[in-house]
Amino acid sequence: MKVTIIGQGYVGLNVAITAASNGHKVVGLDRDAELIKNLNLGLTHVPGIVKDVIQSLTQSNDYLPTTDSAEIAGSEVIVIAVPTPLDSFRKPDLKFLESASKIISEHVSDNTLIINESTSYPGTLRNIIMPLIKSHNKRLFFAAAPERVDPGNTAWNIGNTPRVVAGIGLEATQKVTDFYSSFCKSIHVAPNVEVAEASKLFENTFRQVNIALANEFSEIASALNFSANEAISLAATKPFGFMAFYPSIGVGGHCIPVDPSYLSYAAEKVGIKTQFINTANQINLNMVPRVIDRIKQEMHNTLNGLRIQVAGVSYKSNISDLRESPALNLITELLKTGAKVQWFDPLVNLDLPGRSGSLDTSIDLGLIVTPHDVIDFSVWKSAKVKVLDLSADSKNYGWSKFF
């Protein structure tokens, strides 16, 4: 069937390529002309999707990357996969979702299934998307299927990650189930779209809260002079009732720093104050200044004039994604202390002062923030550089242990 995916970022491109690889004719719509140009050349920004696959799908006309919204016409399924960020007040910003909905309303065909994969609070599909799209002259179906993409994860992908879906009405539910069953192995049907929307928010709120707990635990561990990482690793030996989360300098990416605020916003609209969620958000947002205080303690209470290199600035190991990356905030705050800061990340092409082409062995302090596999930290170890591992991904050296 003809399928249009609106948004060709980390989520949308994954869905587009997977659907096209499983027999669908897919239009990948995005307003970023440079992105579409690169996709037509076979170039991709998403881990796990290779150039040859994109080129093969575009050459066979199974995948059409385009900026032309008129290509939506005739689609049997339209999937919305656009960003849903926070505004300057850390409230939900649905401008991309609303824009996508208006574009659909101008080009949608009769009997089309419209699916929202973009993460948002319960009621978004029914109360925002539907009214913007619904036409009295056309029979349309609406469903929610919140994305569960984990960039860079080689074990779990769209095909084998269980999918939660729900439609508004039985026919929409059947249609959305049939569509995702064509390329997903496991489908779970929620009782209604609001439950499906809420399930995604709770997944990442769970992670945000537990990361905040690990970060607070690291403060306790420091004060009592033991390793938080070692204690958490030992706790994780229990084969039931525990899931390990490790301290870091904060949380990044689209989901964990953002989704809990969408849930909090929805709760506040009905008069519920989410004290637990708000506290977790604040703990993780405040980790950078706390980390800098810890670094100062280890460096005789001053960083002024010290040469410091940050290794890895993306929000997660082995990907180049900078969304909400706390490493960027760390660099900014370190510069305010008077430190001479440089950074090294072979995966990130960012025009930011202090960029270095390799690990520096002449520095006073190295900070491991995002330990990509391609970074050989034995260079620092061999040179006996003083290093502090701040990463939740590494766990090799412990939160406050130096080489």
Image: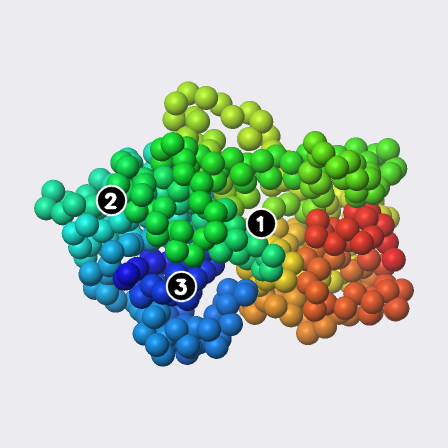
**Which numbered disc, 2 or 1, marks the residue closer to the eye?**
2
- Answer whether residue 335 is visible to the viewer in this image: no
Residue 292, x across and y down, in percent: 73, 47
Measure how far apart labels 2 and 1 are at the Cα level: 34 Å
Q: Residues within 10 Å of mark 2 (few under 14, many from 20)?
A: many
State the colouring used for the structure image.
rainbow
Q: Residues within 10 Å of mark 3 (few under 14, many from 20)?
A: few
Residue 110, x across and y down, in percent: 16, 52
Helix, strand or loop under label 3 = loop
Type of the residue with mark 3: Asn
Residue underneath mark 2: 141
Compared to residue 355, the image places residue 74 above or below, namely: above
> Residue at the spot x=44%, y=45% of the render?
187
Q: Which callout, 2 or 3, points at the residue further toward the start of the chain?
A: 3
The foreground one among 156 and 128 is: 156
> Residue at the spot x=41%, y=33% of the render?
195
Residue underneath mark 1: 252
Residue underneath mark 3: 22
In the picture provided, is 10 more to the left or to the right than 339?
Answer: left
* CB contact under 8 Å: marks 2 and 1: no
